[in-house]
Amino acid sequence: MALEDAVLLARLLAEKTDIATVFQKFDKIRRPRIETFFKYAETSGNLRRETGPWRQWLKEWGMWIMLKIIPESWSSAPFDYDIITLGLDTPN
């Protein structure tokens, strides 16, 4: 995500606007994606804390098996985001 931030900042800075406007646009565009990943990480961390070691081990093996079974298109959704083609006027 740091590379996404760098690419987006470069694109916004290329517009030759003032720095305050650049960072306002940057925040407007990036905040929804950052908050989504933050919620995923928070949920994952909470589940890990509430799970004992054996149950965690079983969950990790179960996830590994599921990732081998489910179609790749289902698990690739978070990676379909393309910062290069993202419109600079609307947050996604």
Image (cartoon, rainbow, N blue to C red):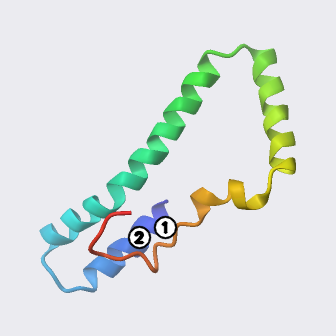
Q: Nearer the viewer, residue 89 or 54?
A: 89
Q: Amino acid at mark 2?
A: Ala
Q: Whole-Å distance between the Cαs marked 2 and 1?
A: 5 Å
Q: Amino acid at mark 1?
A: Leu
Task: Determine whether the residue tagged by mark 2 lies in a helix, strand or loop.
Answer: helix
Disc 2 crowd, CA 10 A, few/some/many (<14, 14-19, 20+): few
Q: Nearer the viewer, residue 70 or 19?
A: 70
Residue 18 image position (x, y, % from top left): 12, 77
Looking at the rendered structure, which numbered label has been put on residue 23?
Answer: none
Residue 37 image position (x, y, % from top left): 48, 46
As drawn, 6 above or below 30: below
Q: Residue at x 13, y 67 (%)?
A: 20
Q: Nearer the viewer, residue 70 or 50?
A: 70
18 left or right of 13 in image: left
Looking at the rendered structure, which numbered label has been put on residue 6?
Answer: 2
Residue 78: quadrant of the picture: bottom right
- Number of numbered labels in the structure image: 2
Looking at the rendered structure, which numbered label has been put on residue 3?
Answer: 1
Residues at circles 2 and 1 in contact by the CB criterion of under 8 Å: yes
9 left or right of 83 in image: left
Disc 1 crowd, CA 10 A, few/some/many (<14, 14-19, 20+): few
27 left or right of 37 in image: left
Residue 92 image position (x, y, % from top left): 39, 63
Residue 2 image position (x, y, % from top left): 46, 61
Q: Residue at x 86, y 49 (%)?
A: 68
Q: Residue at x 28, y 77 (%)?
A: 12
As drawn, 49 above or below 72: above
Task: Determine whether the residue tagged by mark 1 lies in a helix, strand or loop.
Answer: helix
Q: Residue at x 60, y 19 (%)?
A: 49
